[in-house]
Image (tube, rainbow, N blue to C red):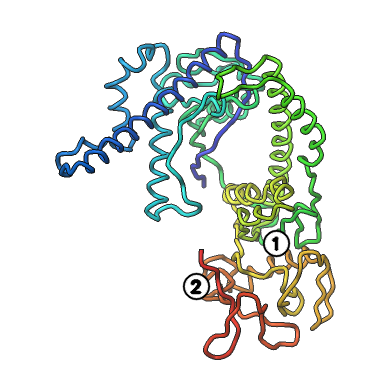
Amino acid sequence: MSARVMQAYRFALDPTPGQVRDLERHAGAARFAFNWALAAVKANLAQREVERSYGVADDELTPALGWNLPALRRAWNTAKGQVAPWWAECSKEAFNTGLDGVARALKNFSDSRNGKRAGRRVGFPRFRARRRATPSVRFTTGPIRVEADRKRVTLPRLGTVKLHESARKLARRLEAGTARIVSATVRREAGRWFVSFTCEVKRAERAPARPHAVVGVDVGVTHLAVLSTGELVDNPRHLAAASRRLRRLARRTSRCQGPDRRTGARPSRRWDRARAGLARAHRRVANLRRDGLHKLTTRLTGTYGTVVIEDLNVAGMLGNRKLAKAISDCGFGEIRRLIAYKTTWNGGRLVTADRYYPSSKTCSGCGAVKPKLPLQVRTFTCEHCGLSLDRDLNAANNLAQLVTSTTGTGVAGDPTPQGANGRGADQKTTLAVAGGDETSTPHRHQPDKTGTFVRQRANH
C-alpha cells in the first residue's frame, strides 16, 4: 500500500548575475503587489468608516473590497495599468504571490479575532519594507521542471537556472512517476537563493525497525533529549558555540554606516558586507541545528513504533529571560513537528502527553507524585519506594509508561483513558505525596466541596 503526501524538496541555486536581477525584480514585484493590496484594503475600510460617521446608510456605502484572493486579483487587474505600468516585465505569478500573502494574512487576522484560530492573537497585517522583508516568489503555472542532467531547473520567465547541488532525489521520483510538482518557491536567505518544490509524493508503506517498541522522549536544555531506554542525547548548543563570532560580527556591523530612516541616508557598502557576513553566520547556526534535529528524529521514528513526547508550552517557557536563549537554541517545537510527520511516513505512532501531566514529579517506580520539584533539583528521589535517578530519565520513563497506563491498547484517543480529558491527565488532577495523602502546592490551589485540594487553571 502507499499514501500520497505533500512533500517539499529544497535546493540551493547558483544563478548568474542577470538571473539574480530577474529574481530580485520578481521578488520586488511580489512585495509591491502585497503593499498595494494592503493599502487598497485599508483605504476601503477607512472610506466606509468615514461614510458611516456622516450617517450614510449601510446599503449606500462604498462597496466593500473582498479579502479573498479572487477579489484582490480582480482589483489588481483593474488598476495595474495605472499603478504598475511595468507589470509586463514580470511573471503574473509574482503579483499573485503578493496578493495571496495579503489574503492569507487578512484571513488569519479575521479568524483570530472571531475565535476560529487557536494560539496567540494575530494582528492586522503590516506593510513590507524592502530591507526587512525576505525576497520570495512562488510559481504555480508555466514550465516548472528539473532538467535531465539533474543540475538545472527551469522556472517561468527565469529560464534555466543552475543548481548548487544535484536534484537526483527529486528527479528519480519524477521519472518513476511517484511525484508531481505542484509549485516552486524561490527565496533568498542570507545572500543565497533557494528553490523549494512542493510535490505530491506517493510514498510506499514503511514500518519501524521495532514496531512494538515504545520510547519516551524528554527534551531539555542540559541534554537535548533523554530517552526512556537510558540514552542521553547531548545538546550541541550551536548558538552558544558561535556566540563569540556573532558578537564580533555584530560589533563590526554597528561600526559601519547603516541606513537612516529619518534622513533617508543609504547604507555604505561596508555595512552591506558586514551585514551579509552576520547573516551567513546565523544561517550556519540554523543549518547545524536543523541537521542535528533531522538526524535525531529520523533515528527515533525509524526505530520505535511508538514515540511519546510532552505537549510543552514553549511560548510560555520563553518568558523566562534566563533560559529563553538556551531554550530557543534547542528547538523544542521543531522536534515535535518533525516527529509528527516522520512517524506517519514510517508507519509509526506519535503519542503526546497532556501539558498538565506531571512527568517529572511522578515516580516511575511506584507512581507517587511529589507536590513540588524545583528545577535546580536534578535527581528524583522517591520517599515512598526509595527510587533515585536522574529527573529527566524518570520523566522519560513516565512518558513511556503513559501509553499503556492511560489507555488499554496504547493508542492515544482510545475510549478508555484515565482522566476526564482523555489525554492521560486531568486539568484538575489530584496530587498525592509519597505517603498517600492527598495534597497539593498551596500556591494557586483551592479546596473543593469535599475538602480535597485541586489544581486551578489561571484565567487568561
Identified at 69% across, 24% down, the residue is 275
Secondary structure at badge 1 equals: strand
Q: For the residues marked 1 and 2, what is the alpha-carbon distance in whole angstroms? A: 22 Å
The disc at residue 216 is 1
The disc at residue 425 is none
Identified at 61% across, 68% down, the residue is 356
Q: Decide if residue 134 is on the left or right side of residue 86.
A: right
Q: Which amino acid does label 1 sit on?
A: Gly
Q: Where is residue 440 in the image (x, y as percent from the top left)?
A: 66, 80
Q: Decide if residue 325 is on the left or right side of residue 206.
A: right
Q: Decide if residue 236 is on the left or right side of residue 71.
A: right
Count neighbours of disc 1 (C-alpha within 10 A) and say few if under 14, some if 14 to 19, many if 20 or more.
many
Examine the rendered structure and indicate whether residue 52 appears above or below residue 381.
above
Identified at 43% across, 33% down, the residue is 101
Q: Position of residue 161 (x, y in %)?
A: 57, 15
Rendered image quadrant of residue 287:
top right
Pick the front one: 375 or 227: 375
Q: Where is residue 100 in the image (x, y as percent from the top left)?
A: 40, 32
Residue where numbered disc 2 is placed:
415
Secondary structure at badge 2 equals: loop
Count neighbours of disc 2 (C-alpha within 10 A) and say few if under 14, some if 14 to 19, many if 20 or more.
few
Q: Decide if residue 396 is on the left or right side of residue 172.
A: right
Examine the rendered structure and indicate whether residue 275 appears above or below residue 292.
above
Disc on the earlier residue, 1 or 2: 1
Q: Which amino acid does label 2 sit on?
A: Pro
